[in-house]
Image (tube, rainbow, N blue to C red):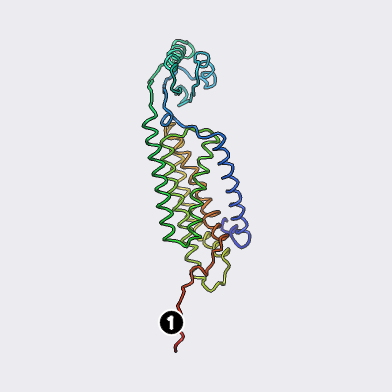
């Protein structure tokens, strides 16, 4: 059924509408990142992390209000289950006193009857080093991708793949900024996985476009028709691959618990937008840049042409 939407002018129109939507989402993501920034976790900021359980199920908002009465500084409370909670405090001189106050309050209250499981200070130095190394690894991966694409593809297809890759990363970061989901080291690792997955989708479509352009060196079909045919021929494979991967990531998201939730959300979003961008950006942008079958015609010098013309 999807293949019918990619026929003729309708398919071309849908691809360009998708690219326009992608451009709007990128602008929105950049605006959100500049205004709200990322909610960096303790891996990067450091601070005090306390985990505790309650004897009975307690509403998160009620527990947060109760702790706020016995806590003078800023804190973030998250639920890890029905009766399992995690409280994060920023590093400060009064954090130790605050921790003693609210911990005493929740453990001595008969309605809450909390039990502290662990309380520790997490320094940001290791997180800063890992963040710098992770960003360096992501930058090196981007450079390697650009070199690979420049060698493998004609420059228009290479530019489309790189733009699609940057688009995917920006949208994932924009989602984390918009929803203020904690950005930690596992999320940073998922961005490296998204680079590989997004590139795989773009290369599959780009390879097929290149093959069809070489076959259509007589310019019988327009570049838009050739790109539509390339997408149709790879669409089933792309949907099956993305669908099975999304099912696995969704299982991690729902069943693996809070520690891997950010990783699963980032990877799930990256796979969805990566599949979308491989069609609407990686295959459409080269068309706007003037990609045609002429780019793959074999150039023959005058001497060789004379030999070919000889009877």
Screen quadrant of the N terminus: bottom right
Left-right relation of 283 to 199: right
Give the percent coordinates (x, y) of residue 231.
52, 59
On screen, 224 above or below 93? below
Q: How many marks?
A: 1
Is residue 275 positioned above or below 99 on the image?
below
Compared with 5, 121 (above or below) is above
Let me know if residue 85 appears in the view.
Answer: no
How packed mark 1 is, by other alpha carbons closer than 10 Å (few <14, some 14-19, many 20 or more), is few
Which residue lies under the disc numbered 1? 303
Whether residue 75 is visible here, answered yes or no, is: yes
Give the quadrant of the C terminus: bottom left
- Name the spot of residue 240 as percent of width and height, x first: 47, 52
Residue placed most toward the observer, 284 or 258: 284
Q: Position of residue 74 (x, y in %)?
A: 50, 21
Residue ID at (41%, 36%): 185
Q: Where is residue 90, by image quadrant? A: top left
| Kind of element beneath mark 1 | helix
Q: Quadrant of residue 178?
A: top right
Estimate the x, y position of residue 27 in percent, counting from the top left: 58, 44
Camera-side residue of 144 and 273: 144
């Amino acid at each position: 059924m999807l293949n019918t939407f990619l026929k003729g002018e309708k398919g071309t129109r849908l691809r360009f509408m998708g690219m326009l939507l992608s451009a709007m989402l990128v602008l929105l993501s950049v605006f959100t990142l500049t205004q709200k920034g990322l909610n960096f976790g303790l891996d990067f900021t450091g601070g005090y992390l306390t985990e505790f359980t309650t004897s009975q199920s307690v509403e998160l908002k009620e527990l947060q209000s109760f702790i706020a009465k016995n806590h003078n500084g800023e804190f973030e409370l998250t639920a890890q289950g029905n009766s399992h909670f995690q409280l994060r405090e920023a590093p400060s001189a009064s954090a130790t006193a605050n921790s003693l106050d609210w911990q005493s309050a929740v453990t001595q209250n008969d309605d809450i009857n909390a039990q502290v499981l662990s309380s520790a200070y997490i320094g940001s130095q290791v997180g800063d080093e890992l963040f710098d190394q992770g960003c360096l690894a992501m930058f090196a991966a981007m450079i390697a991708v650009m070199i690979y694409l420049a060698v493998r593809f004609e420059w228009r297809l290479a530019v489309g793949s790189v733009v699609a890759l940057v688009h995917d990363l920006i949208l994932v970061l924009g989602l984390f900024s918009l929803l203020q989901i904690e950005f930690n080291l596992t999320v940073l690792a998922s961005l490296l996985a998204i680079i590989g997955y997004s590139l795989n989708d773009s290369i599959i479509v780009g390879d097929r476009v290149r093959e069809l352009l070489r076959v259509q060196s007589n310019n019988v079909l327009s570049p838009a028709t050739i790109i539509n045919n390339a997408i149709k021929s790879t669409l089933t494979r792309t949907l099956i691959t993305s669908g099975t991967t999304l099912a696995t990531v969704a299982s991690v998201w729902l069943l693996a618990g809070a520690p891997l939730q950010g990783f699963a959300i980032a990877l799930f979003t990256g796979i969805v937008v990566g599949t979308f961008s491989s069609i609407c950006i990686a295959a459409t942008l080269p068309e706007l840049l003037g990609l045609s079958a002429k780019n793959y015609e074999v150039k023959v010098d005058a001497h060789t042409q004379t030999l070919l013309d000889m009877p």
